[in-house]
Image: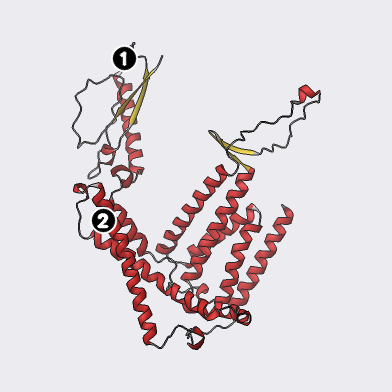
């Protein structure tokens, strides 16, 4: 019977336990590097399978030293790839720094430079593209879905600045990947608990149906009790690609279009709805205020997090409830500042003559929409994409 010995290698800061060394344990020394003790703090479990009753067979000194050097080099390489947060743990200060860093990147905010061709496209054409990118991933085959995702990713890398598209694509890709994995294994992954009541073919005297020679298999992959089937692939690809297309296309539209341009485009599309009593001015004014308010929300989240980080709180000396209380006060401060900004905006609107009736208060968008060559080219590309999607469905 083979025994498995598990030995944890703790941090150098911890006192060494007074135990008798087992000859079957392999010591993995860390690769020497100035200022980097992550490999020393990494908890490794080294398994050695041997017979507990029989001592290990002696080997030559050259082979043992070679094995030790190879194991040490492998451990150092793995430790170099592990992020610092995974080695040292994620504390409250690291969480606040991540929040402040994430809020510093412009999310759904207008980026005026560098100016690209998307900045000059008419906002009405952009809204038509947004509607098409919502419908096409849900109505197309799997090749068209992934093609749309790749196209949006390449367009984002071409149009947006490096620090913007790297952050946005990373988050949207992570979210879409989680959706793909969960739905891929969850849609049709668990085997059915019901058993068929039909007797086997051998009992009925019917010859067995031969297997197909084409290599078709309904189950694509198995992972323990879960299975990844063709149905799960269809559901997961549709949901993940649709989520990616919605988030990334909306982000592209908001980063290349001012709030006034979007409000004017929405006003142009909703003018006929005024005939049936739809409050178009209220909807447009609400949209305009919401787009203007996004920047204030991210600024408050970032500034409140930086205010706590700059105070250099000694988190190790705080109890768990004290740490939770600080985070509750952080969230409370964010909402309080946001409500204060909303009150200031309402007072400014009242001071400028707004009395709560958008019909009697004219909204100035300060923008002029004109149909140009780039808008016609964008519409031609949209029609070509829709034709390609319908043609690919016929081929599939």
Residue 249's spot in the image, x, y percent? 53, 65
Front-most of residues 188 and 90:
188
Residue 17's spot in the image, x, y percent? 20, 27
SS class, disc 1 = loop
Determine crowd level at label 1: few under 14, some 14-19, many 20+ residues with C-alpha closer than 10 A: few
Relative horizontal placement of residue 215, taking residue 268 as reference (left or right): right
Residue 288's spot in the image, x, y percent? 46, 76
Residue at screen point 22% across, 20% down: 20
Residue at mark 2: 326
Can residue 122 be seen here? The reply is: no
Determine crowd level at label 2: few under 14, some 14-19, many 20+ residues with C-alpha closer than 10 A: few
Residue at mark 1: 58
Can residue 331 be seen here? The reply is: yes
Quadrant in the picture for residue 346: bottom left
Front-most of residues 321 and 58:
321
Is residue 104 depicted above or below 261 in this figure? above
Residue 182's spot in the image, x, y percent? 52, 46
Residue at screen point 29% across, 65% down: 303
Residue at screen point 34% across, 46% down: 83
Q: Earlier in the sequence, mark 1 or mark 2?
A: 1
Q: How many discs appear?
A: 2
Task: Give the image's coloring scheme.
Answer: secondary structure
């Amino acid at each position: 019977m083979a025994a498995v010995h598990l030995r944890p290698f703790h941090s150098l800061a911890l006192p060494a336990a007074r135990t008798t060394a087992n000859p079957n344990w392999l010591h993995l020394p860390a690769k020497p590097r100035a200022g980097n003790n992550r490999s020393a703090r990494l908890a490794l479990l080294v398994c050695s399978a041997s017979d507990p009753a029989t001592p290990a067979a002696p080997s030559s000194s050259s082979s043992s030293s070679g094995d030790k050097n190879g194991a040490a080099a492998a451990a150092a390489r793995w430790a170099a790839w592990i992020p610092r947060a995974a080695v040292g743990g994620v504390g409250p200060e690291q969480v606040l720094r991540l929040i402040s860093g994430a809020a510093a990147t412009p999310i759904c905010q207008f980026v005026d430079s560098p100016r690209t061709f998307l900045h000059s496209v008419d906002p009405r054409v952009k809204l038509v593209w947004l509607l098409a990118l919502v419908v096409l991933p849900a109505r197309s085959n799997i090749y068209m879905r992934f093609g749309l995702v790749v196209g949006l990713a390449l367009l984002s890398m071409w149009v947006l600045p490096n620090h913007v598209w790297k952050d946005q694509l990373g988050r949207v890709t992570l979210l879409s990947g989680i959706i793909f994995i969960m739905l891929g294994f969850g849609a049709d992954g668990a085997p059915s608990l019901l058993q068929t009541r039909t007797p086997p073919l051998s009992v009925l005297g019917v010859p067995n149906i031969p297997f197909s020679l084409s290599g078709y298999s309904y189950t694509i992959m198995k992972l323990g009790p879960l299975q990844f089937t063709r149905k799960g692939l269809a559901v997961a690809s549709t949901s993940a690609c649709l989520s990616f297309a919605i988030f990334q296309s909306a982000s592209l539209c908001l980063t290349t279009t001012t709030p006034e341009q979007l409000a004017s485009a929405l006003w142009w599309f909703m003018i006929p709805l005024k005939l049936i009593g739809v409050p178009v001015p209220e909807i447009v004014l609400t949209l305009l205020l919401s787009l203007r308010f996004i920047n204030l929300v991210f600024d408050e989240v970032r500034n409140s997090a930086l205010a706590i980080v700059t105070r250099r709180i000694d988190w190790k000396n705080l109890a768990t409830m004290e740490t939770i209380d600080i985070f509750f006060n952080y969230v409370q401060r964010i909402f309080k500042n946001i409500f204060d900004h909303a009150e200031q905006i309402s007072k400014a609107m009242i001071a400028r003559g707004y009395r709560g009736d958008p019909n009697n208060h004219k909204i100035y968008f300060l923008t002029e929409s004109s149909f140009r060559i780039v808008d016609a080219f964008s519409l031609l590309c949209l029609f070509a994409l829709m034709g390609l999607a319908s043609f690919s469905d016929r081929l599939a």
